[in-house]
Image (cartoon, rainbow, N blue to C red):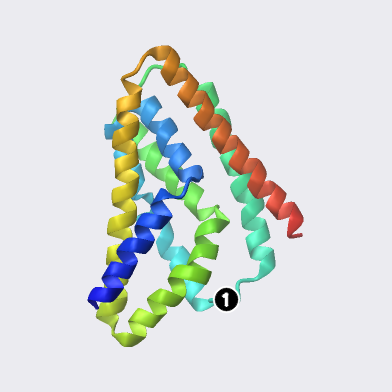
Amino acid sequence: MFSTIVTGIILGAAAGMQPGPFQAYLLNQTLKNGWKSTLPAACAPLISDGPIIALMLMILTRTPREMLTVLRFAGGIYLIYLAWQAYRARNDQPAETARATRQSVIQAAGMNLLNPNPYIFWATVAGPLLLEGWRESPAAGLGFLFGFYVSLISVFMSFVLVFGFVRHAGRSFRDKVATVSALVLFGFGLYLISQGVVHI
């Protein structure tokens, strides 16, 4: 069981440190609303990954190609929408409110559900490891999940705290970083759509 927990921790840290739209979203939300309002959004995978894991375990390695294509298109469009929102709000006054916190969590969870990467990740990497641990014992399987999410969420929260320091830099610098993060979201959106076109 200890080995499965360690495996989960290592895999979670690696997944969390890979640059992606989720990290860009956390950066933008931290600059916009502050680290206190954005920190709960780092836990969004705990909300969105449940259905993803359940689905991938049911049809592990047999995911219909059409489903991933639809997810690519939907995820790309959603990321472009978030990029437009982020760019439009780059000069807004920060708003550390309960509403901003809820919005960040909901948007982050929605991004994960429409992003094909978690589906592919759980179908090809994490899912088989989870099943292997579960066959050893349910405790080992749960240990893998525990280690993975403690590590993943810790990395995301660290990003938010680091980005929080950036927020206290000069206004011009914050606006530039916010614009870059919006462009990154837009770029990932176009990339997902292009992948959808390729896999039609």
Picture residue at 28% right of the left edge, 68% below the top: 6
In the picture of the structure, the residue carrying the numbered disc 1 is 61
Front one among 162 and 40:
162
Residue 27 coordinates in the image, percent (x, y): 41, 34
Quadrant of the image containing the C terminus:
bottom right
174 vs 141, left or right, is right
Quadrant of the image containing the N terminus:
bottom left
Q: Pointer 1: residues within 10 angstroms few (<14), some, or many (20+)?
A: some
Can you name the residue that lies furthest to the bottom here?
136
Q: Quadrant of residue 157?
A: top left
Residue 176 drawn above or below residue 122:
above
Picture residue at 23% right of the left edge, 75% below the top: 2
Is residue 112 among what the camera can see?
Answer: yes
124 vs 11, left or right, is right
Residue 90 drawn above or below residue 23:
above
Considering the numbered disc 1 on the image, is that residue within a helix, a strand or a loop? loop
Is residue 37 among what the camera can see?
Answer: no
The total number of labels drawn is 1
14 vs 37, left or right, is right
Residue 28 coordinates in the image, percent (x, y): 44, 31
Picture residue at 30% right of the left edge, 62% below the top: 9
Look at label 1 and name its amino acid: Thr
Q: Quadrant of residue 71?
A: bottom right
Residue 106 coordinates in the image, percent (x, y): 42, 44
Front one among 5 and 114:
5
Q: Quadrant of residue 8?
A: bottom left
Residue 171 drawn above or below residue 179:
above
Residue 64 coordinates in the image, percent (x, y): 65, 71
